[in-house]
Image (cartoon, rainbow, N blue to C red):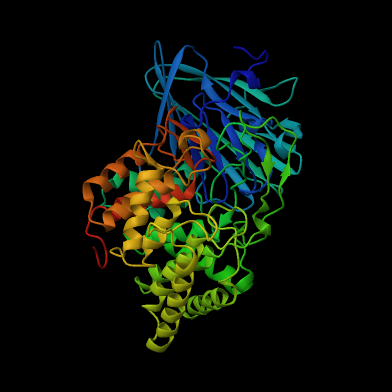
Amino acid sequence: MTGGEPGAAADFPLHVLREYALIADGERGALIGPRGDIAWLCAPSWHSDAVFSTLIGGGGQYAVTPAQEPFVWGGSYEEGSLIWRSRWVTTSQILECRDALAFPGDAGTAVVLRRIRAVDGDTSVRVALDPRAGFGRYRLSRPRRHDDGTWTGRCGPLYLRWTGAPEAVRQSGGGLHALIEVPGGQYRDLSLEISDRPLRARCPEPEQAWSATEEAWRQAVPTITGTLADRDARHAYTVLRGLTSAGGGMVAGATTSLPERVQAGRNYDYRYAWIRDQCYAGQAVAAVGPHPLLDDALGFVTDRLLADGPKLRPAYTVDGAPVPDERTLDLAGYPGGVDKVGNWVNQQFQLDSLGESLNLFAAAARHDLLDTDHWRAVETAVAAITERGREPDAGIWELDNQRWTHSRLTCVSGLRAVAAHAPAAQGSRWTQLADRVLADAATDCLHPSGRWQRAPGDERVDAALLIPGIRGAVPGDDPRTRATLDAVLDELGQDGYVYRFRQDGRPLEEAEGAFLLCGFTTALALHQQGREAEANRWFERNRAACGSPGLFAEEYDVTQRQLRGNLPQAFVHALLLETAQRLAGPWPGPRP
């Protein structure tokens, strides 16, 4: 014990990101550390203030950890679910804690389920519950133990109820603590409800909640076979489902402010639904089948296009509202990072989102999923490209406004893809528009070497320029496609990983981490060229860039073998899923 009172924050120091597991229910997610401590949970929604925020220097703890030390930690997900089992081995016994958010989630109420199991003998665990709503501003107030052993209380604007620990006692610094004894071979259930409204009179029965959660995951996650890595592909789908709300909005990441590079100032809030990321996820799911996540992406993007048209925002909250402006919290932040919530993406125009939307609609059309509203959204996106296609935009990496090549070529690929499913006359007009956009890009975005360059005034190569080639902006045997791939491999590839672009004169790995999205797209580009052995090597290298829970962050520090950026990052899981599927068979369509 290092923190004075049992359950003090010092008992649960921060860990490297690869050691955190995610539990999620579609409406919010929690990160659990190796000592059974929930270091991150926002409630009631993804973008709400956090109740447990020690991950970024805030307050709040909910920990279930072995009372006997020393111990070593491991864990795994139950197949096809985000039900996590922490497993601890002490010098004399084994114990487990099964963790989940009751699934599917209720928009206003989070239910954290925890089951402590004594695997091979009597055991005891320390349990600490110290919620701090508002990123640590509000302590648990007026905790009351009822006759049935249930605890209730308020935490700022939230209502809490905790069952399963009648022996808990109040701590002088706030919160509750218990030493729970579990006989060998038996288990103890804990259930924590956190809501933005008064809770119903009756507590949910743990057995019923667990059974409902298990069945809901069985229904939500399809069996995925025939890929290059079936287990990882299915897990990627599961993570995407956990990040997707009932309204179809999928957050780009479960966390905020986790640094991409130590003290580099690149810390962002990803708890929102980016149109681009939603389209990547939908296209990945479409590659394996017409599964429900494709419908979710299709519905969310359709609603946003019909509502906003040419003023389509790059990102929204999962319920379709504007993303709040960026602000700081006066917290220490995750080591090497800062403490930001909200996002300045509100001020941006990202042209490629329109093109990716059309790629999504085309992927859905291949499964015969488009109805009248979807086609109206297609027409809206085409009209927006016609109106705004020559404007500078912030691009895929959300930088300064330029006429980014990737943005324009993505519109070309989207127009070509959806034109193939439209009536002949309409499809012809859209193809002609694609030809004009392509010709425009070719006038000022071709490097003297014959490859695509980032922008008219920026001759560097960019790994994002592989994506339009994969999506069909230009054929795979086009010299520009091949030259761009060769340049990416030569200038941005290193040790089996790919960097986005060369930031400056420093070695690539000193400027930022390898970008896992780009690693998977490189594998797809090699597959398109028929370079199968190379494609498989790049795929295998990048799918290993995760921690033991199988979660991917945005970037990977190749030298230190550490995850960088927010965790988990949805579009990395999406591209893993798609790459695993596509590499298992021939390239769809014409091939060099």
Q: Is residue 222 visible?
A: no
Q: Residue at x 48, y 37 (%)?
A: 513
- Left or right side of 291 for 405: right
Q: Residue at x 28, y 47 (%)?
A: 230
Query: Relative to residue 578, is residue 441 depicted above or below?
Result: below
- Left or right side of 439 for 105: right
The image position of residue 482, as x and y in percent, is 31, 58
The image position of residue 258, as x and y in percent, is 58, 37
Query: Relative to residue 565, is residue 518 depicted above or below?
Result: below
Query: 207 or 401, which is in the foreground?
Result: 401
- Left or right side of 499 for 46: right
State the count of labels: 0
> Furthest-bottom residue in view?
425
Residue 220 lies in what quarter of the image? bottom left
Query: 346 or 397, which is in the foreground?
Result: 397
Quarter holding the C terminus is bottom left
Q: Is residue 324 visible?
A: yes
Query: 383 or 169, which is in the foreground?
Result: 383
Quarter holding the N terminus is top right
- Left or right side of 162 for 181: left
Query: Relative to residue 550, is residue 460 depicted above or below?
Result: below
The image position of residue 164, as x and y in percent, is 57, 31
Query: 264 or 489, which is in the foreground?
Result: 489
Q: Residue at x 59, y 77 (%)?
A: 387
The image position of residue 365, as x and y in percent, is 38, 73
